[in-house]
Amino acid sequence: MSRHLHHGWRILLAVAASSVVAACGSFDGLTGRMANSITPYRVEVVQGNFVSREQVEALRPGMNRQQVRDVLGTPLLTSVFHADRWDYVFTLKRQGVEPQARKLTVFFTGDAMQRFEGDTMPSEAEFVATLDRKVRPGKVPVLEASDAALDKFQGAPANAAAAPVVDLPLPASYPPLESPAR
């Protein structure tokens, strides 16, 4: 009986091998279709300083370096060889969206800004609209408090919820900061 069992295993192995060989052609077609429908995840790459049109419009010739830094932020590139030049570079790479790259160069004479040049910058609203392609930009709410809204807070005292302050006497001496030497 062991001879029949051994012969059965051979037949089963031959059938399995022929099934695998026959399936190779359909497997290649299946993997090709799957590869076209499934794309790997790609990390969003954001590098540099985003500079908006509003920030560029705030620049004025004669501003000192600190004022320019306050408006634009710390430059991405500063060079020992070009001490009178700051480069603001911004790149954004996202899956399914055309990569964005913008550059702004600020030139100084001594400590005063002389001029700037670079790409046309988008406004903050335009830039935000390009970030989220699923959500359509809606109406931006007004973030100002009206006089009527502020009046309802005028009547409440600032320390209404605070507990009364009790003046306690200070200790006459404090413990030493270091342990005594042994």
Image: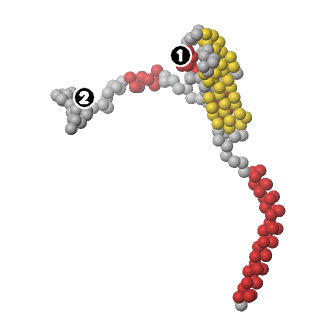
- Residue beneath disc 2: 165
On the picture, is 137 further left or further right than 6?
left
Residue 87 locus on image (x, y percent): 64, 21
- Residue beneath disc 1: 66
Q: Quadrant of residue 153?
A: top left
Residue 142 locus on image (x, y percent): 55, 26
On the picture, is 158 further left or further right than 110?
left
Residue 52 locus on image (x, y percent): 63, 23
Q: Quadrant of residue 73?
A: top right
Find the residue positioned furthest to the left: 172
Amino acid under label 1? Gln
* 179 or 131, nearer to the observer: 179
**Element at badge 2?**
loop
Amino acid under label 2? Val
Residue 117 locus on image (x, y percent): 68, 17
Q: Is residue 55 visible?
A: no
